[in-house]
Amino acid sequence: MQQSLHRIVALAIKELLAVLKDRKSRIVLVVPPILQLLVFGYAATFDLHDIPIAIYNEDRSAPSRELVARVTGSPPFHLYAKLENEAQIAPLIDNKDVLAVLHLERRFSVDLYQGRTAKMQLIIDGRNSNTALLVQGYLRTIISDFNLDWARRHGQPPPPATLQVRPWFNANLESRWFIVPGIVGLLSLVITTIVTSLSVAREREAGTFDQLLVTPLRPVEILIGKSVPGVMIGLFEGSFILLMAVLWFEVPLRGSLGALYIGMFLFILSGVGIGLMISSLAVTQQQGMLGAFLFMVPAVILSGFATPIANMPTVVQWITCLDPLRYFLIILRGVFLEGDSYSLLLHYYWPMAIIALVTLSSASWLFRHRMN
Amino acid sequence: MNPATAMRMRLLAMFRKESLQILRDPSSIAIAFVMPMFLLLLFGYGVSLDARHIRLALVVEQADANTASLTGAFQHSDFFLPEAYRNIQQAEQALRAHEVDGIVWLRTDFSARLLATGKAPIGVFINGVDANQARITEGYIEGVWQVWLADFARARGHELAVPVTLEPRVWFNAAVRSRNFLVPGLIAIIMTLTGAMLTSMVVAREWERGTMEALMVTPIRIWEITIGKLLPYFVLGMGGMLMSVAMALWLFDVPLRGSFWVLTAAAALYMMVALGMGLLISTVARNQFVAGQIALVTTFLPAFILSGFIFQINSMPTVIQTITHLIPARYFVAILQTVFMAGDIWPVLIANSAALVLMMLVFLGLARRNARKRLD
């Protein structure tokens, strides 16, 4: 037993050195995750900000100017140009100079004063359909505020029923609070997979893996020895990114840290398992790298990181059940924003545990059985 | 033998060597054809930002004709899957357990206040964790509310006085299908992967094994190595791209409003940029591990997040917007989205292609300089 432990420790140290001894490998493991967190943390946002728009106001009356001022004065929009005729609209939109043009016809204020519904026309670039939807949403809010004020000032009755919308967990609907915890999961996945996916392939290519197999080390011991560096580096960097999310991006951490760490441990273990499985299937490092990629790209896109799983077709939703990142993202967001604790998250722990178990045992089986 | 013939022979030999290498290693073919197909299928069907089937808990504390017409409006909407809950506590529990995405709550006095004061509150709670989806959900709920208000007024024999309404006209994508803008962007991501990843790994392997130095002592010149090496991967990458375009058009029904030749020319240019990037990475990295890592960090993730593929570049902070100018995928995504959805809009095409040409020259130039320096 003690001997076995001794062997595992020796192998783990050797594995850790293999990754960390090269200065470039070290840099590659530390610098990119930090840079990515900083850049992506700011870049990955669905909130609109400084969207260039143009105004074509034929009416030029006081109410139309007031409405236009409300739009251009709000943070999501920024006035790019005031247009003089209709022909100017198409080139601005085509060339992506502006994302949207607001058009108020000459009869706007007449309609408004006479109690007919006045129309504000919006011409919007649909090349990014999500932004197009969001712009409409923002404008509708501005218009309905305007309508309420107008009704009050002109003695018209207010609508009989009003909506009182209250978002839970994220009162100001900041998409950064959604994305940054996601980046913690994304980068942990990238780091763990990269560290482990080449570890067996590198030795196979160099021929030292056969030597490892004829040592007294049993496959289980090789498996543990090879897993330790991935788990250690993953946990270390994961914690660092977590700290940055809380201290730098000021995302509230409302739930139990222990519950988060159980999730992180299981997630990294399943990442290591998948990495080692890919690595034992690969003959060359190139194949290992490709395998890591073929796993990582779908794992990121189908995890719910940027686009919701609920919108996917049923068959694709089944596939996402195999994606450990999917569960970890729910745990991260649950603990960060919803203040979840162990009992609510139990549901998401065990699938990761199963993925880890299956992939780690297949990797260990493949050590011996994948001989050329 | 005259120099031109000699050069042609050297190039041809190099091309043949690389082509054979590709054909003998099935993983290269897999990355050029199987991976794009697999990715497009998965993402084309899987990635969507259109909120549909929003699960909504309806809590009606005292049912009558007015509440029935409002809940009916939610039931008839395509966007919602409403479910009745007996009381607000149960609904809140369901919201917490992710069983529903939002709650619409009509209190006991809803009808009384509706008829008396005309200011009956409709309580709406939304799970705001996914802020984007929450905003879209909010918009749809507002839409249902407005339609119901108009019906309510009409039922009472008068028109609802709405001072101003918005009349949106979405150009290039009238149905606001997110697939139309995501699938063209995916082509950029896939080409970045095949181009930069594959070359960086392949060339890094040659450096690692020392066969690159061996090549350099032969009469073949360094740019001949470059062309001979890149050409087979160029052909491979373009094959994958054509397949992706075919799938976008016939499987995902994305319109192609610009010309096919403009699209192909732009793709060829971008393929060169991606190959140049891969080559440069391989000369900077000494081994495959580092090359693969750098390729991942500088290609896939930026192409996903910083290119405008999914996140609007205008909305990013100024510093980040400046950084996006260094990401080649940014220019190609703009070209793809324009050619597919809007047509051949030359100012957009020319500006972005010029940026790509510049990046290609910089990458190839730097790769050449680095390759020279390594031999010293």
Image (cartoon, coloured by chain):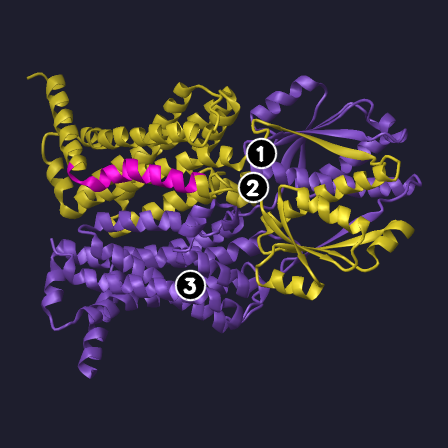
SS under mark 3:
helix
Chain B shade: yellow
Residue, x 61% and y 36% (percent of image)?
A132
The dot on residue A238 is: 3
Give the mark, 2 or 1, whose residue is nearer the N terminus: 2
Q: Mark 1 Cα within 10 Å, few/some/many (few <14, many 20+)? A: many
Is residue B126 left or right of B322 when viewed as pictured? right
- Dominant SS type (magenta): helix
Query: Mark 2 — residue?
Result: B50
Between the C-alphas of marks 2 and 3, the distance is 32 Å
The dot on residue A56 is: none
User: What residue range appears in magenta?
Assistant: B24-44
Three-letter amino acid code at disc 3? Gly
Query: Mark 1 — residue?
Result: B176
Closest to the observer, A369 or A182: A369
Three-letter amino acid code at disc 1? Val
Q: Quadrant of the N terminus of chain A?
A: bottom left
Residue B170 vertical placement versus A269 (above, below): above
